[in-house]
Image (spheres, grey):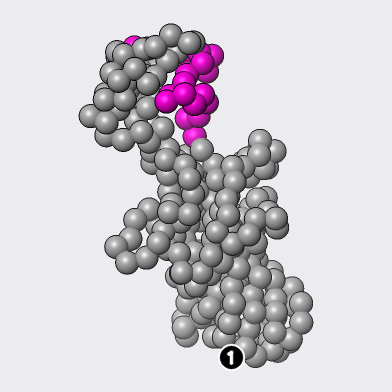
Amino acid sequence: MMRLDKCLSHLGYGSRKDVKKIIRSGEVSINGIVCKKEDTKFDENKDELMIQGVEIVYQKFVYIMLNKPQGVISATEDGLHETVLNCIQDTTKGLFPVGRLDIDTEGLCLITNDGQLAHELLSPKKHVDKTYYVEISNPLTKEALQEIEKGITIDGDEKCKPAKVKQLDDHAIELTITEGKFHQVKRMMIACQSEVTYLKRISMGNLKLDEELELGQWRYLTDVELENLRQ
């Protein structure tokens, strides 16, 4: 059972004062009966909740896939730039991006309010794969490819874990890493005497970017995607 005001707050309907105003205005009903008391308890898994004429399905945790465009910050708020939360139309309280993508990096951004799942995906002990499509200025030599696969050293003394690299052509690769060092992919390419000209994350663990999502578009994860992500 859950308090009505707590439910609306979790769903992002505003401050405690805002939520109380909505409830007392008669805009909320439970099983077809208007409810004006904020301390009313209901079964969020069984009872029908309607707010301002719209049926609401309560979910404790939300999982969103965003195809992040360039120019957007992987953060919950920023004074200068648009954030990934500005790209989605979900007001659930406590949403945040799992990990970071640079402002000029596109691709898969997972947004959730499930802190436990985020911790598991980002934990160094888990070694969750992150795969990127990378366009580069200079072709990688055979020696550079071997260095990447055995664990390349960046900035002179910082060792990376072994990575997987697939050469698509002279100026494009797929790179899979299990770490999240600052600007890691860019620094790895610099160590290979090349530079990143375009970067896009295409998967995280077992979650792959939906190719039908245009830049800036988003959708909720399917049950199958969520199950695979947790494996």
Please say whether residue 213 is visible from this viewpoint: yes
Quarter residue 148 falls in: bottom right
Query: Which residue corresponds to the image point at 41% horizontal and 58% vertical from the top-left?
Result: 83
Image-based side of 116 in relation to 214, left or right:
left
Query: Which residue corresponds to the image point at 70% horizontal and 84% vertical from the top-left?
Result: 171
The stretch of residues the image draws in magenta is 40-61
In front of the other: 124 or 106 = 106
Residue 147 spot, x, y in % from top left: 65, 80
Q: Amino acid at mark 1?
A: Gln
Looking at this view, name the residue that lies furthest to the left.
17
Q: Quadrant of the C terminus?
A: top right
- Is 46 magenta? The answer is yes
- Is 106 magenta? The answer is no
Image-based side of 186 in relation to 204, left or right:
left
Query: Which residue corresponds to the image point at 34% horizontal and 56% vertical from the top-left?
Result: 77
Please say whether residue 127 is visible from this viewpoint: no
In front of the other: 40 or 191 = 40
- Residue 87, compared with residue 136, is above or below; it is above
Q: Under tag 1, what secondary structure?
A: loop
Image-based side of 216 in relation to 143, left or right:
left
Query: Which residue corresponds to the image point at 58% horizontal and 58% vertical from the top-left?
Result: 67
Residue 91 spot, x, y in % from top left: 42, 40
Residue 125 spot, x, y in % from top left: 53, 52
Our reading of the magenta stretch's main secondary structure is loop
- Residue 28, compared with residue 187, is above or below; it is above
- Residue under pointer 1: 193
Q: Decide: few, some or many residues near mark 1? Use Cα within 10 Å; few <14, some 14-19, many ≥20.
A: some
Residue 45 spot, x, y in % from top left: 52, 18
